[in-house]
Amino acid sequence: MIDFDPGTAAPTNETVARNGGDLVVETLEALGAKTVFGIPGQHALGLFDAMGRGNLQFVSSRVENNSAFAADGYSRATGEVGVLFLSTGPGALTSLAGLQEAYATGVPMVVVASQIPLEGLGARRKGMLHQLDDQKASAANVTKSQRLIQHASGIPSAIQDAWTEAISSPQGPVWIEIPQNVLLDPIMVPPVEDALAEAADNPPRVELVREAVKWLEAAERPAIIAGGGTRRGRAEKSLLSIAEKLRAPVICTPGGNGAFPWNHELSLQSWIEDRHMTDLLEDADVLVVIGSSLGEVTSNYFTFEPRGRIIQIDAEPRVLESNRPGLGIRADAGQALAALDEALSPERAVEPGWHGVPPEELVKESLAKVKARLESQDLGKELKFMADIREAVPADMQTFWDMTIAAYWAWSCWDAREGQFHSAQGAGGLGYGFPAAIGAAVGLETLGKPGRVLAVSGDGSSMYSISELATARQHNVPVTWLIVDDGGYGILREYMMGAFGKATATELARPDFVKLAEAFGVPATRVAPEDVGDALRAGFAADGPNVVVVETLLKMFAPTHLDA
């Protein structure tokens, strides 16, 4: 059970004048926010003072980047908007790498950053603490939009508009900043009683749906790539129906992992980086790409050369045809697939077949080829390690993966079952797994659901977020953190050895993770790779946070794009 100490909140004082911070808190509460992540700062004290008069739970991280990851994880786990409070200057800037992940992956967040007082704005150099020439410009590459609020009366509408933008596809983080004196000065604006934010409609154009249906109903070898937009658009039910109508093989990208049933007879699972799968997809006469740019990983590192026609569906118009020409349909994936599903006839005029092979048999043969390739590479330890983790994790548990070799395996081999798979592949920054899992656990328990989640990191990536052990302990967050310790940046070591025959600057002096966790008051254990399953089960059964450390060197399966 997560512990929020009511003694840490300032008592309500009816005689305290309301200020701009109260308008922020009241509007967020009216929009449905329940939890805020962040770190207090001098210019943001008006926000935190107002929280003491409100009902928002506050989770205080130790580094702002991790606060952003936590708000991201909260949103992914719950489907709600993540809310982040930041202080001016260094605090705001430190969050940007975390916001890049949310922006790249389409995670809805509302970010409220403080600013220097109004009189210092406009690049005037008054020598104010934390002063930047244009703070919101720093967030322009990692948020959907940026707003500066200069008057308290504008706060409720600005936050309502930001919330609406965050949840409208393509979803993502939206940045608001409010000067210190606007947050602190007394206001005449009455308390916020209601606020409404509804996602903007983003349906497909009817002529594009009609054309796509024409292509698909004439296709002999249709196939589907389900990217992260499929999950964000909650399009899983329509995807399943379309695949079964077309008898089309479906492969999921790392971001789309879980969008299609893993063991379905048409499921190619997530082996998107294997040449056998690349060959199959290249042979499709119509390929439907949903919520993916056909980028580096999905295209098997740009070796993918499709010979058929492509139908690409994405809420972000800049993604359409960015890597391959095709019939681009700008729309929310859920709305687009629902429209396609409704328009497709349940009776196929063309019998699908891949040069005489039924699609279901083709799927089975392709998965067998991948399995045989892996078994030929002396990867028994890695395959067993990942299988042991999978069997230990309850079927409905959500998992959060850092950029580490175990996660790269999971991109391809992890069956999400009834849970959800989350990783940092959007922007690819280190340190995501543990703080995102903290945010997820907080969110799930806030919604009255079982909160236990799993985070997986390497020893290198774990050091980016090791301070969040204090956050997990302070709030008694039910996160089990698996740290796979190989003494360095393992995947970079492997890349450099493969490219240059030696690795440089990849080896790390690292702490005793068990003793370090215990210093934070977090139970920890070190186990051999073959005992990881039992250790995880014990961690899942415990209360609060805990850490499992496995010292082992994992290898990646051999890349196939180099043979193309």
Image: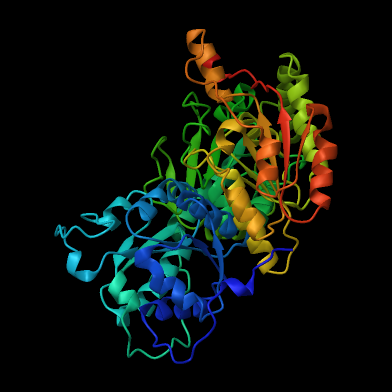
Instruction: State the image coordinates of residue 473 (x, y, percent, origin top left).
Output: 66, 55
365 horizontally vs 438: left or right: right
Residue nearest the observer in this picture, 136 or 545: 545
In the figure, 393 relative to 302: above or below?
Answer: below
In the figure, 287 relative to 28: above or below?
Answer: above
354 horizontally vs 199: left or right: right
Can you say which quadrant of the picture contains the N terminus? bottom right
Residue nearest the observer in this picture, 471 or 205: 471
- Residue farthest to the front, as pictured: 519
Instruction: State the image coordinates of residue 302 (x, y, percent, origin top left).
Output: 46, 26
167 horizontally vs 536: left or right: left
298 horizontally vs 177: left or right: right
In the figure, 324 relative to 74: above or below?
Answer: above
Instruction: State the image coordinates of residue 138 (x, y, percent, origin top left).
Output: 30, 51
Residue nearest the observer in this picture, 380 or 264: 380
Residue nearest the observer in this picture, 428 or 282: 428
| Residue beneath the point at 55% across and 28% down | 282
Residue 168 seen in this snapshot? no
Instruction: State the image coordinates of residue 188 (x, y, percent, origin top left).
Output: 32, 90
Question: Within the image, what quadrant is residue 127 found in?
Answer: bottom left
Residue 294 seen in this snapshot? yes
- Count every numbered label the image shows and give the total: 0
In the figure, 19 relative to 309: above or below?
Answer: below
Question: Within the image, what quadrant is residue 512 found in?
Answer: top right
- Residue farthest to the left, as pictured: 124
